[in-house]
Image: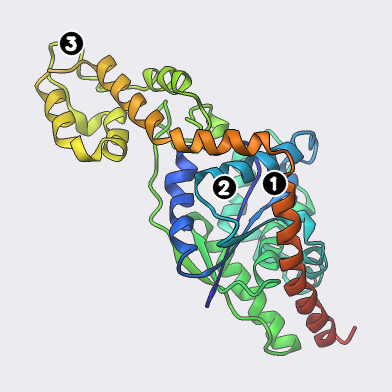
Amino acid sequence: MRRVLTGFRPTGKLHLGHYHGNVQNLIRLMDQYECFFFIADWHAISTEYSDTSALRENTREVAIDLISAGLDPEKCVLYRQSDITPVAELFLYLAMVAPVSWLERCPTYKEQVVQLASKEVSTLGFLGYPVLQCADIIIVHGEIVPVGEDQLPHLELCREIVRRFNFLYGDYFKEPEALLSEVKRLPGTDGRKMSKSYGNAIYLSDDPDTIRKKVRQMITDPQRIYRTDPGHPEICLVFDLHEIYSSEEIAKVEEDCRQARIGCTQCKDLLARRIADSLASFRQKRKDLLEDEGRIEGIFAQSREKVLKIADKTMADVRNLLKL
């Protein structure tokens, strides 16, 4: 069975954008491939190195959210990146052969330098982020990496590094392939892409009242001034989410809006109820995991042994290839 690998930066709790953009897809992949999923706490340090006080708790929160959302530790290997210390050694060897020019030309690097202008990110760790990603993938011989289009340059860079390593030391690593996910760009409450950094996210762990308050903040049809005015669902953010959460009744929702049979506040409250209802099972699973304090660490410990067995063998082979 082919091996899938992907990671999650622990920047806080997961929101609806994470779920529809990535997690749903991973749940399907668990039944088709051998899946390795990790919480990338080392990667988080690349931008949050000045304050790591929340890192451990954020790592736990992401693991809890992933399992509550449907990732099954019996069907996948869910582990913490920093538990697999051989990754750091492989990163060192890959960094020896990865030209700086390759890293500097990466479009994602250039974009993030601009986006994170308020932070000091001119560090070796930030520049070498894709090299560490490559080490994460190939140390367990990941063959398939689910990515969005924005991450394709990183994966292609990894493939180039693998080709160079194999050319220098022997044909050992496979070049990982991209599994391009059809990521749904879920709008946040302000219309921009849903993101924690924008403060516009609806979190999977939000209670029904919080969801209702957030949905009520959403911008609706700007052309609909009065309650009796006909609506235009095609330009309404709320309708975008109705297409996901009210799919079985979407024709009725659309018609009620166009005929002014329902007001924007009613429409928002209907959406909020649908979102909250869809997350009822998630909230219960999350509550159970929070009450079982040792559960997550137990999963990490079990997974650590599985991953280290593969990683240690990989590093023994790599050291032999490098004549160390």
Q: How is the image coloured?
A: rainbow
Using residue 251 as the reference point, say whether residue 285 is left or right of it: right
User: At which x and y percent is residue 243?
Assistant: 26, 38
Q: Earlier in the sequence, mark 2 or mark 1?
A: 2
The residues bearing labels 2 and 3 have C-alpha atoms spaced at a distance of: 42 Å
Q: The C terminus is located in which quarter?
A: bottom right
Q: Residue under label 1, please give it.
A: 296
Which of label 1 and label 3 is nearer to you?
A: 1
Mark 3 highlights which residue? 227
162 shown above or below 218: below
Q: Amino acid at mark 3?
A: Arg
- Does 286 appear above or below 83? above
The total of numbered circles placed on residues is 3
Quarter of the figure with residue 97: bottom right
Q: Confirm or deny contact between disc 2 and disc 1 (CB under 8 A).
A: yes
| Dot 3 alpha-carbon crowd within 10 angstroms: few under 14, some 14 to 19, many 20 or more | few
Residue drawn 39% across the image and 22% down it: 215
Q: Nearer the viewer, residue 222 or 217?
A: 217
CA–CA distance in space, label 1 to label 3? 49 Å
The reply, left or right, for residue 122 in relation to residue 207 is: right
Q: Amino acid under label 1?
A: Ile
Q: Earlier in the sequence, mark 2 or mark 3?
A: 2
**Farthest right residue?**
324
Q: What is the spatial separation of the Cα atoms under label 2 and label 1, in whole angstroms?
A: 9 Å
Camera sees residue 55: no
Which disc is residue 67 wearing? 2
Say above or below: 288 vs 27. above
